[in-house]
Image: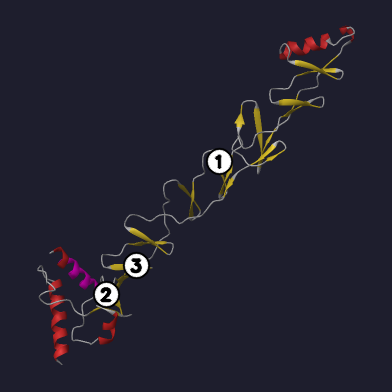
Amino acid sequence: MKSTFALTVVAEAVLATLDETSVLLPSVVGLPPFCTFTSYPRGVGTVPKSCAPGQERIGVFCYDDCPDGMSRNHLDCHSNCPQREGQVFEDHGLFCRLSEYSRGAGYPWRANDGLSFNGAMERCEAKHGKDKCEKYGLMVYPKCADRYSAFGCCLCRPNPPDCEELGLGKNFDLSCAKKIVIGKPELGVCASDEELDTGLCYEKCKEGFYGVGPVCWTSIPSGWASCVTFAAKSSSDCAEWTDIPGGYPTCDQVTALMLRTLEN
């Protein structure tokens, strides 16, 4: 009976102190042995609306921006086909391929050219420049551009590219495999007054509470133990719970009292 009366006095003193401006020091009365859990709703969670810097939203997820030299292809990033002077790459899906080109029908020998191809050569050079033409078979053709070689009579085929130097993948004849960065979906970021929980943004809980989904629950006071439905100063005290008139203070009230005591 005396024990119950003493606990009642302690609990009532703590609760009264939390409603006053003065601070109750533990050395005078002490903290109650138990505190009760409480909770409050914090609203329905919402899907994060923003992405972190350096990300873009695709659907409901955020993906890192593509690195320089790459472009978005659905959810992934693929290499851009390089375009350099004297090298024209065609985009073939997963590959970049250097293109051959035709050097035309050529310049044939004519009856009034005599017994040489000088006339055909002059006609070719008149259009393409001196020393820019060559004889192949019975025709004269413009020479292939730098980095290209004649392939048969009429095509100029590029030299195989240095795919690594171009920042691309493995070489296959005139093609380079594109590099691919697989997109990794990430959840967005919440507003500064919100926190992310199980993929949704919720209003942050007030001090002394922690969030689980749409509910904020009382945090256990520092150094105390959880007894499932209430908290005690130690786990061994859990079995000592005794109901008292008016009940014990809530755990957030005890935490607030502890903090106020430390400040003083």
Q: Earlier in the sequence, mark 3 or mark 1?
A: 1
Q: Mark 2 against mark 3, which lies toward the viewer?
A: 2
Element at label 3: strand
What residue does disc 1 label?
Answer: 70
Q: Is residue 127 left or right of residue 138?
A: left
Relative image position of residue 17 (x, y in whole percent): 12, 73
Q: Answer with left or right where residue 177 lies relative to residue 42.
A: right
Which numbered disc covers residue 167?
A: none
Work out whether 96 lies above or below 255: above
Q: Could you give the CA–CA distance between mark 2 and mark 3, rounded to whole angstroms?
A: 19 Å
Comparing labels 1 and 2, the label whose residue is closer to the camera:
2
Q: Give, as a three-letter code, the residue at label 3.
A: Gly
Say whether residue 261 is left or right of residue 147: left
User: Magenta span covers which residues?
Assistant: 251-260
Residue, x 15% and y 63% (percent of image)?
Answer: 263
CA gap, disc 3 and disc 1 = 41 Å
- Does residue 42 belong to the magenta stretch? no
Which numbered disc, 1 or 2, marks the residue that appears first in the sequence?
1
Q: Quadrant location of residue 28?
A: bottom left
Q: How is the image coloured?
A: secondary structure
Name the residue carrying label 3: 211
Question: Image height check: is 213 above or below 61?
Answer: below
Q: Position of residue 4 (x, y in %)?
A: 17, 88
